[in-house]
Image (cartoon, helix red, strand yellow):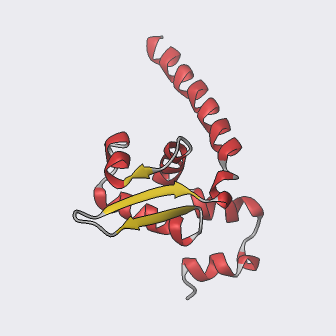
Amino acid sequence: MKSKKTRRINNFHYACSVEAALDVIGNKWKGVILYHLLGGTKRFNELRRIIPSVTQRMLTLQLRELEQDEVITRKVYPQVPPKVEYSLTKYGESLRPILQALQKWGKKVMEKAQVAGQS
């Protein structure tokens, strides 16, 4: 059985390009993390405060996967306590128009749900 990472490396296993894209950013939290990194470099605890509903373990896992896929970069400062910062790579920056379009569409979804809730 091939691992997910092997599948990503050997992209010829994807049925279509949308599947390949969603394999990298398709998790519930990855899009949210990436959206917040559009605003600039963030420390781990900043991301935890901005996204309070994600667990520490899940945030760590998602950040590791995004780093492994070279969408974000992790910078560790040699100090006590440790300081770690996350930012988008150039490759990750290419997601900016997609994430902004999702944010705009998400507002419409929220407005529609609010109208439906008032009915």
Residue 114: where, in percent of width, then height? Answer: 48, 18
Q: Quadrant of the N terminus?
A: bottom right
Residue at point 30% right, 54% down?
A: 55
Question: On screen, 39 above or below 44?
Answer: above
Residue at point 44% right, 62% down?
A: 62
Residue 51 location, quadrant: top left
Residue 72: where, in percent of width, then height? Answer: 54, 61
Residue in front for this viewpoint, 113 or 106 = 106
Question: On screen, 109 above or below 84?
Answer: above
Residue at point 52% right, 63% down?
A: 73
Residue 101 location, quadrant: top right
Residue 97 location, quadrant: top right
Residue 112: where, in percent of width, then height? Answer: 56, 21
- Asked if residue 97 lies left or right of residue 40, the reply is right
Question: On screen, 68 above or below 24?
Answer: below
Residue at point 29% right, 57% down?
A: 56
